[in-house]
Amino acid sequence: MTEQFKKGDKVEWNTAQGKTIGKIVKKLTSPTDVKGHHVAASEDNPEYLVESDNTGNQAAHKPDALRKIEE
C-alpha cells in the first residue's frame, strides 16, 4: 500500500543531484500546474507538493517517490 503523508511531514526523494530532503506542503487531489508542469493528480492518484529544505523550490511527486524520515 502507498504511504499517506500529511502537511509538514519530513520526506526525502531522489533528484538528478542526489537525495533531497524537504517537507510536504499539501496533498494534490485534482489536476493542477506547478511551475509550468501539468500535474495529473486525482482523488484516486494523489500527488504531493513538496518543498526542498536546501533550495525552497516546490515540486509535485507521486507518493511512491517519497520516503518519510524522522526528524
Image (spheres, rainbow, N blue to C red):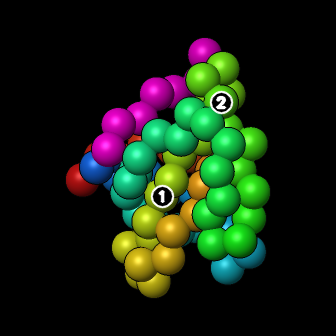
Q: Residue at x 38, y 73 (%)?
A: 53
Q: Is residue 36 above or below residue 69?
A: below
Q: Residue at x 53, y 41 (%)?
A: 28
Query: Residue 14's quadrant in the figure?
Result: bottom right
Name the disc covering residue 50, or none. Answer: 1
> Looking at the picture, which amino acid does disc 1 mark?
Val
Q: Is residue 35 above or below residue 14?
A: below
Between 56 and 10, the one lying in front of the other is 56
Q: Is residue 5 magenta?
A: yes
Which residue is outermost to the bottom? 55
Q: Is residue 27 above or below residue 34?
A: above
Residue 39: give x, y in percent of width and height. 71, 50
Foreground: disc 2 or disc 1 = 2
Between 36 and 69, the one lying in front of the other is 36
Name the disc covering residue 42, or none. Answer: 2
Query: Residue 34's quadrant in the figure?
Result: bottom right
Residue 36: give x, y in percent of width and height. 71, 71
In what element is the residue under mark 2? loop
- The span picked out in magenta is 1-7
Q: Residue at x 45, y 71 (%)?
A: 52
Residue 27: give x, y in percent of width and height. 47, 40
Residue 40: give x, y in percent of width and height. 74, 42
Between 13 and 60, the one lying in front of the other is 60
- Residue 44 visible in the current orientation: yes
Of helix, strand and loop, which mostly describes the magenta segment? loop
Q: Is residue 2 above or below residue 28?
A: above
Q: Is residue 12 left or right of residue 19?
A: left
Q: Is residue 30 left or right of residue 57?
A: right
Q: Is residue 13 magenta?
A: no
